[in-house]
Image (tube, grey):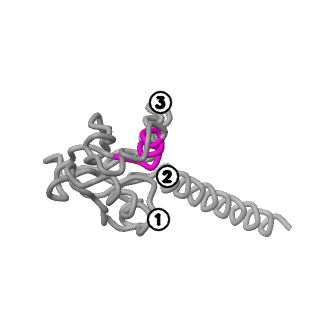
Amino acid sequence: MRISDILGAKGADVVHIGPDAPVRALVALLRAHNLGAVVVSTDGRTIAGIVSERDVIRQLADGADVLDQPVRSVMSADVHRSTPHDSVRSVMETMTERRVRHVPVVDEQDRLVGIVSIGDLVKSQISELEFERDQLEGYVSGAGAGHG
């Protein structure tokens, strides 16, 4: 299964926020869309960074004044990207190695075309395993019927 299969099922809409927006606006955006992370972008196509709830929480430990700081002060600028052609397994391995839960998806021109979460990938793996199980059960049931 490929990342493009997941985007085809979930859609390619990506919520983003500008790097100069206050962290307070980011928190509102995360809450309004029930998200764990948001791509940081000035135009919705190029990636300046990514910022997660975890990034905000870590900064809040130093004081609530972070809410008035720009998003760029809490975002991760080193963003691992995926392509629609990448396999789900390879992206899952990368997420595990890099300890990230969200990966933006970019096209050949490095333009943002989607985002996948570890939850999206796990859900796709479960669906694939259920499909294989159903196929095997059908095969076993069909093979048994012919030998009776």
Residue behind mark 1 = 34
Q: Which residue is mark 3?
A: 97
2 or 1: mark nearer the eye: 1
Asked if the residue under mark 3 is in contact with the one under mark 1, i.e. CB atoms within 8 Å, the reply is no
The secondary element bearing badge 3 is classed as helix
Q: Earlier in the sequence, mark 3 or mark 2?
A: 3
Q: Nearer the viewer, residue 132 or 110?
A: 110
Which tag is nearer the camera, tag 3 or tag 2? 3
**SS label for mark 2:** helix
Q: For the residue marked with disc 1, what is the amino acid?
A: Asn
Looking at the image, residue 98 lies above or below residue 55: above
Instruction: Give the amino acid type for the residue marked by disc 2 in the picture.
Output: Leu
Distance, label 2 to label 1, CA atoms, is 18 Å
- Category of crowding for the residue at label 3, using alpha-carbon neighbours closer than 10 angstroms: few (below 14), some (14–19), many (at least 20): few
Report x, y in % for residue 138.
69, 66
Q: Which residue is mark 2?
A: 121
